[in-house]
Every structure is written in C-alpha cells, then in structure tokens.
Image (cartoon, rainbow, N blue to C red):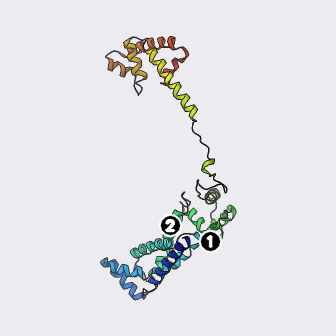
C-alpha cells in the first residue's frame, strides 16, 4: 500500500511538472506589457499569465529544499504563493525580469513553511534563528538525525555576542518532536507509561475529602451554640463566599460597625472554647 501511495505522489508531481513545462515562457517585452496591464487596469488575466509562465522556476527553487524532507508539492504550493505575491508587487518600470524579483519571495514563502512545519514547537522565531536553521541545513547533516554542533553553528552565524542565543537554539533543534505513544523497546511500554503522575493519589484525595466533611460538621455544630445575631455575623463574615468588612455587615444588619466587632469578638471567644485548637478552621473555611 505504501508503494502505491508513493507512486501516486510521484506520478502527481511528474504530471504537474509536465503540465507547467508546456506553458510558453514570456519574452521580456511580453512580460513588461502584461505587468503594466495588471498594475494599471487590475487585469487578472494578465496576472494569471505572469504567474503560470514562471511556475517552472518555482519547482526548480523548491527542489533546493528537498533535504528538509517535506513533500515537494507542499513546497511548490508555498513557492507559488510567493510568486503570486511577487507578481502583485512587481514594478515593470525598473527594467529587470519578474523572476529575478520573485526569487526572494518564493524562497521566503518556502522557508517560512519549513520553519512552521519543522516542529510542533516553533524553532525559528527570529531572523538569527532562521539564518542559523538554513545555514545548518546546507552545511551539516542534522537533517538526517545528527545532533547540532554548537561551536560550528556559532562560527557560521557571524554574530558576535549571540553565543547564548545560538546555544539555546541548537538545543531546541536537537530536541526533535516524538510521540509519547512510541514504544521504548520492542515491547508495549511507551514513553507515556514512564511519565510520573505528579497529582495526588486516590488515597490522599479521599482522606482530604473526609477531613473537609469532618471540619464542616464540627463548625456547623459549634455555630449552634451561638446566639442568632452572633451566628449571623460569623456566617456573613466567614461563610458568605467573599470576605465582608465589619462595615458591610453592619449596613446589612442595620447596626453599627462597633457592634458588629463586639458580636464577632464574643462569637470567636465562644467558638475557641468549643473547638479548642481547631478554631483556626474558621480562617480556612
């Protein structure tokens, strides 16, 4: 089945190349005229002719990036986007050919695609990192799984004072993505099986739940020993969901702030006598 899919992909690429090679190239005069028509009249037919006549050059440029193990048709598609961008911005009055101008855009789109899809974690977010990434791909064999040599990349970077950034980037390139479901050996054990569970175990969770239930029971029993007004103040002060000030409670009950403070003080003394050291549970409630 894999051989069939590989053959289908090859045939698709070959068919595409054969089709675009049938499209006639443009002379410089034809190209200039079409570009002027597009810029002046927004002639989409002229833009289409400019794009299609240069598709074969995109294939050639995309071929330079085969070593990055991306699908050629994906690289070509991105390069075509760069070509269309170049056609949109091309100025025929400057006297040079479209492809001379478009090469930069084609490479930019292809390189951006490679950077974006190389890893689940972004590996090239700055100009320095992108420069290192593609210099490394040309000079070293890291595309085949070799680890990156920091000293060698630092020599390539031509950037004084960037040692720390280069070293950090090399570490990111060496840490390639892999599936946690991948087997460690020929057996069934996977990387996921080896990850430690840092959460609380079931026994601790059950114990914490029992402690909380017991705490609430003791508090509820202790509150029944207070007067109705004291219980009202304590409930609003500590169990209303959000902490309320003495003034807020006083306004709600229609009494002064000082009276609320007295009621709270009396209630806490009673609770301390009932609960003993466990009276601190009120603060944690």
In percent of width and height, residue 96 lies at: 45, 82
**Relative to 43, is 164 above or below?**
above
In percent of width and height, residue 258 lies at: 39, 14
Tell me if residue 4 can be seen.
yes
- Seen at 50% across and 70% down, the residue is 110
Neighbor class of circle 2 (other Cα within 10 Å; few <14, some 14-19, many 20+) is some
Helix, strand or loop for disc 2: helix
- Seen at 57% across and 31% down, the residue is 204
In percent of width and height, residue 163 lies at: 65, 58
**Relative to 172, is 203 above or below?**
above
- Seen at 64% across and 67% down, the residue is 144
Task: Name the image quarter holding residue 135.
Answer: bottom right
Residue 123: mark in rendering: none
In percent of width and height, residue 206 lies at: 54, 30
Residue at which label 1 appears: 138
Q: Which numbered disc, 1 or 2, marks the residue that appears first in the sequence?
A: 2
Q: CA distance from mark 1 to mark 2?
A: 17 Å
Neighbor class of circle 1 (other Cα within 10 Å; few <14, some 14-19, many 20+) is some
Q: Is residue 16 or residue 52 the one in the foreground? A: 16
Residue 113: mark in rendering: 2
Task: Name the image quarter holding residue 91.
Answer: bottom left
**Relative to 172, is 200 above or below?**
above
């Amino acid at each position: 089945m894999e051989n069939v899919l590989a053959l289908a992909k090859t045939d698709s690429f070959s068919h595409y190349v054969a089709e675009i090679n049938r499209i006639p190239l443009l002379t410089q005069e034809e190209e200039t005229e079409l570009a002027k028509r597009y810029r002046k009249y927004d002639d989409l037919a002229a833009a289409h002719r400019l794009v299609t006549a240069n598709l074969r050059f995109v294939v050639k440029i995309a071929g330079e990036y085969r070593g990055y193990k991306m699908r050629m048709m994906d690289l070509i598609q991105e390069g075509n986007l760069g070509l269309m961008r170049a056609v949109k911005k091309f100025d025929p009055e400057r006297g040079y050919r479209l492809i001379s101008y478009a090469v930069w855009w084609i490479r930019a789109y292809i390189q951006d695609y490679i950077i974006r899809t190389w890893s689940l974690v972004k590996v090239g977010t700055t100009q320095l990192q992108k420069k290192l990434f593609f210099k490394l791909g040309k000079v070293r064999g890291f595309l085949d799984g070799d680890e990156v040599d920091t000293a060698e990349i630092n020599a390539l970077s031509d950037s004084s004072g960037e040692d720390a950034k280069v070293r950090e980037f090399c570490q990111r390139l060496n840490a390639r993505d892999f599936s946690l479901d991948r087997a460690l050996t020929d057996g069934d054990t996977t990387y996921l099986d080896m990850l430690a569970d840092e959460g609380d175990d079931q026994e601790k969770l059950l114990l914490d739940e029992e402690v909380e239930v017991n705490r609430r029971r003791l508090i509820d029993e202790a509150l029944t020993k207070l007067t109705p007004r004291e219980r009202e103040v304590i409930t609003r002060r500590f169990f209303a969901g959000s902490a309320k000030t003495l003034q807020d409670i006083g306004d709600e009950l229609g009494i002064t702030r000082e009276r609320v403070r007295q009621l709270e003080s009396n209630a806490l003394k009673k609770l301390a006598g009932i609960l003993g050291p466990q009276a601190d549970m009120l603060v944690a409630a």
